[in-house]
Image (cartoon, rainbow, N blue to C red):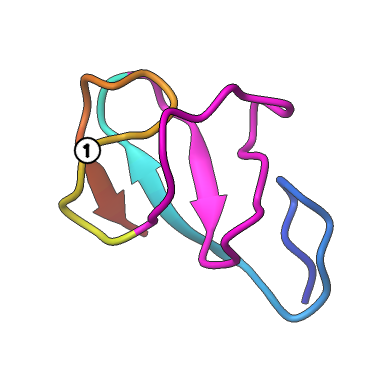
Amino acid sequence: MQCPACGRNGYRLYVKCDTCGCCFCNHGNCDGTFGSLILKGSGRAPGSLCKACGKGKLKKL
């Protein structure tokens, strides 16, 4: 299994933003499905604020 966003083996997409639609695996250095996003913090917990757009909530996939 490989994350389609960052390409790391052993990870799958974990959360998706309900506003901008970017997805992340649960690896802390995942770039997201849009690639090379400028993140405004760290953390991928479901229900937290999206670190890419700063507006949406991360929903578990």
The amino acid pointed to by label 1 is: Leu
19 shown above or below 33: above
Q: Give me the residue at 71% from left, 45% from top.
A: 5
Q: Quadrant of residue 1?
A: bottom right
Q: Is residue 31 covered in magenta?
A: yes
Q: Looking at the picture, how far across and down is residue 14, in whole percent?
A: 46, 62
Q: Looking at the picture, how far across and down is residue 7, in whole percent?
A: 84, 56
Q: Quadrant of residue 41?
A: top left
- The image shows a total of numbered marks equal to 1
Magenta residues span 20-44
Magenta part, dominant SS: loop
**For this view, does 10 lie left or right of residue 9?**
left
Give the labeled residue for mark 1: 49
Front residue of 40 and 52:
40
Residue ranking furthest to the front: 41
Q: Give me the residue at 51% from left, 67% from top.
A: 26
- Mark 1 closeness class: few <14, some 14–19, many ≥20 residues within 10 Å: some
Q: Give me the residue at 20% from left, 48% from top.
A: 48
Q: Looking at the picture, how far across and down is residue 61, in whole percent?
A: 37, 59
Q: Give me the residue at 38% from left, 33% from top.
A: 51
Q: Quadrant of residue 9?
A: bottom right
**For this view, does 35 lie left or right of residue 55?**
right
Helix, strand or loop under label 1: loop
Q: Is residue 39 covered in magenta?
A: yes
